[in-house]
Image (cartoon, coloured by chain):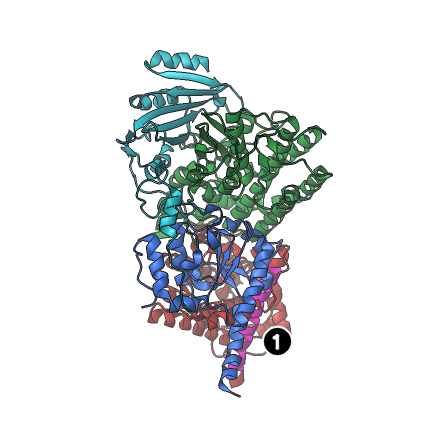
Chain colours: A red, B green, C blue, D cyan
Amino acid sequence: MHISEIILSPLLALIVGVFFLGLSRKIMARIHWRYGPPITQPVIDIIRMFSQKSVSHGNLFNFGIIFSIAGSIAVVLFIPFGRIHPLSNSGGLLVILYIMLLAPLGIALSSGEAANPNSSIGISRKLLLTLGYEFSLLLILLALMTHYRTISITEIVALQQKGSWSLFRLPLVLPGIAYILILPAILGVRPFEISKAPQEISSGPMVEYGGTYLALAKIEHAFAIVIGISLFVNLFLGGANNLAFFFLKVLLVFILGIFINAVFPRLRTEQAIKYLFGIPAFLAFLGLVITVLI
Amino acid sequence: MRELELYYGPQHLGMVGNFSITLNVEGDRIKKATANPGYLHRGFEKLMECRTWMQNFPLVCRINVVEPDHIELIYSMGVEKLAGIEVPEKGKYIRSIYLELARVASHLFGLWAYSNMLGFDTVANWAMYHRDLILDLFEELTGARVYHIYIRPGGVRRDFPDGFEDKIIETLHTIGGKIPDYNSTFFDNRLFKKRTKGIGKLDRENAKKMGAVGHAIRATGMKYDIRKIEPYAAYDQVEWDVPTRKGGDAYSRLLTIRDEMIESVHMIFKLINKMPKKGTVYTKTPNPFKWKIPEGDAYVRCESSRGELGLYIVSDGGKKPYRAHFRTPSYSHGLTILENILAGEDIADVGNIMMSLYVVAPEIDR
Amino acid sequence: MDRNKLIKWIKTPAKMGNKYSLHAVYFCTGCGIIEIPPTITTRWDAERFGVTPAATPRQANLFLITGYVSLKTLKSIIRTYEQMPEPKYTVGFGSCPINGGMYWDSYNTIKHLDKYIPVDGWIAGCMPRPEAIFIAVTHLWKMIDNDMADGYKKYRNNYDQYRANQEKVLGSLDWPPLFK
Amino acid sequence: MNDLKQKIEMAFDSIDINIPEDNRMIINISKDGVISILSYLKNAGYEHLALISCVDLINENEFELVYIVSAYMKRDDEFHDREKQNIIIKTRISRKKTRFMTVINIFENAEPYEREIYELFGINFQGHPRLKPLFLEIEYEMPPFRKNFDTRKFVDDMFGNIPEIEGH
């Protein structure tokens, strides 16, 4: 661990996340037969939002959003990006699993203060969705930890670097598939875009966010994308030895996510929950049982 | 769970047109829905009483912005009936072709709105692009993209330009070639079926009771179409079928709309083949400033892309209409039916149901 | 470096942000809305210029008033406008907000929108084509560059007059004044 | 059409029916008979209420209420003459005593139409569950669709003297 890594790692995640936001808009535009915005568009948007006057709805409103950003940064610190792994030796998968809940919780706290019915519906949807994938995620991580007999991500990555990727190891195939199936829900892309759902509840929790708050929420979203995918890449696609190769893997997974986003409509909340507690949870459970038995 | 009052519209991404619904919700479930129209009320029927018969044309087409053509037609039909004007044969054909093009354009707009409600941007973008191709045809024919003012009492304003028929055929082939794409991404998509089947169910009895028309009643299996029942323009000259579905839910309504588009395109091809090559396209009408129409009243109706469109028009023998009242299809759909079938549904399905009924707000408010 | 130059230099990124990230309120005020879907979708693709619809007024900075404004709509327009964070820009789309247009003798539509909320620019015509929106956007860019798009400041400075006009047509408004 | 005419004439006395053209029938009836003729027509299969309209006959100091009903199809894919027919029922009420009966019990979709007429003509429909404004935001000095409401004069009075915003 090095102090420069603690600064570098969140910065890197931020840059990559914002770049991904721009890229997703560009690729979506191309699928729509459009030219699309410049790839720097999210940066411009964020600058604009910071320059606007913003209305606060109370102390909790301010605190919640900062809380959620801080939570995101904390998670980033525990995830290795290639060789940059500031804290990932000290914590482990369980720590990540806990702090990953902070970001949605912070948003929930903050937008709950706004007392807009749209945002309260959005929060309840978001928490339900989180509950939906968290269960499978827990099972998947348990399977991983039992298989590798460690809770440290760095060690898991190192073990994969020596052998084959977890996705192709026999007992871990099922959890791997389950992870792929819940990945759109973790990223919040189209079939599971239920907490934002602009056409239903006008962007849900973000409905009262303007100016700085919106910019922070955007940044939190960028972090969330990077966290969701990097975790998958580290755990199942073998991580990487250097930074470029790592982010290439992240990019490929992300592009897959955009394509899923482009060809599906939004699910209803109960349909999404039913889906998440269906096949993915079953596969993850089966995988866990197999791993334990082997 | 706490009951919340949620304002759906008028400023809302899931709202097409300036319309608002107040929802009483418990969690995601709607307890009660109250439609709240009037954001677009301009008092058309009052303004028409202050303008001469011909001056009203630019006004009436603005009643429905999505599809002004049928409103032009219904007003022309009313004036023709009161004044006893006949439409020449070729004029009738041109009217039919033009109206069917308008129907396709309007349904594509509906498809945009609908897929947008489901969060299906891709199809929404495609549909809007294809609608634009048809608007290009309108622009060449009439000089305007949106408000064409092409139909006039006694026929249409002018003949098709040279080679226009070929252009229509070419454009429609371009759009028709993409139907497989639409089917595979949208209509056959499993999630689309999951989202629409059984949603916004309107069975036959309720549909009749609440005055459903157009595709809302055709989706319950009845071939109720004014073009067949009371043919106007040249709809009785060619063979065509009324597409129906059995389900009565949003899925059936959407597929009815798709089949209707395809049927319209086929009908346009048949009409172009059968259209007389020569002849006038309109009957001369008197000087519009001095034109007086004999006393009387009439009710005329036609099939717009959302259903039965009617006009009750009264003349007192003067230069101006004494009273005109439009019976618009969205009126019953948007106020009576929407309020009734929204209760008990999910919030996620408000836009879904509203656009599957194809409610267009300016038509309600007038 | 003198002070004015420094302020200008500091303000540059903010201006750039405001210029190239115009998020429009998605409010279908009138028939002009029919040209908005073509503008934001495939054929014209306004996202090239950073113009996209925003989900709520809080997230927006451009208010495109598309068409005639009936009294009931005026009420929602004022509320929406007051919710938008500053700086915000308003563009009137179509002839009807300019002077009533087709509905000059209608009892339920207002005639001059700029008497009730400030308007930075107009797009004339019925219907203006989607290209006209782009021309308006480029004009707005120039105005932002030269600090001429200052409708929101005008609203703040002359709030009493605006509020008086609003109350004249709508009766007493049921929300407190934005500025005291 | 003629069969129906005879049947109605048998069932109702003091009723004036004429058939101006094919598939249109105009029934003039006094205001007490409206409910019964509408329910009679509904039982006869004319169960689609297309429109409720109102005409302000200011010279005769009366409002004319117009109900237009037509029929849905009997079978799903057979076309008959019946659904071609539109029956226009007219009745008159005094301009002074603007009261009338609601027909919601017969036709459910009459509800918004009656609300609209209540608002734009000021006719009270007795028994209507929510007779409150539908379209208008402000109160006008009289319902705006009446003939003696001069919209141009109203516009001059209301919007003509609103001052421009001065200052910067």
Up-down relation of residue B220 to residue C171 (above or below): above
Give the image quarter of residue A294.
bottom right
Which one is in front, A154 or B359? B359
Residue D3 in sight in this render: yes
Identified at 41% across, 27% down, the residue is: D68
On whether residue D35 falls in the magenta region, the answer is no
| Residue C34, position as x, y percentages in the image | 53, 49
User: Is residue A149 toward the left or the right of residue A123 in the image?
Assistant: right
Q: Give the amino acid type for the residue marked by disc 1 in the picture.
A: Leu
Is disc 1 placed on a helix, strand or loop? helix
Q: Could you tell me which chain the residue with mark 1 belongs to?
A: A
Residue lying at 44% horizontally and 72% vertically, measured from the top left: A71
**Percent x, y of residue B350:** 43, 47
Location of mark 1 (residue): A243
| Residue A21 sits inside the magenta stretch | yes
Residue D46 % position (x, y): 42, 23
Segment tinted magenta in the rendering: A5-28
Q: Is residue B110 above or below residue D51?
A: below
Q: Main secondary structure of the magenta part?
A: helix
User: Which sits in the foreground, C83 or B28?
Assistant: C83
Quadrant (top left/top right/bottom left/bottom right) for the C terminus of chain D: bottom left
Q: Is residue C134 above or below residue B88?
A: below
Residue drawn 26% across and 31% down? D97
Label 1: few (<14), some (14–19) or many (≥20) C-alpha neighbours in 10 Å: some
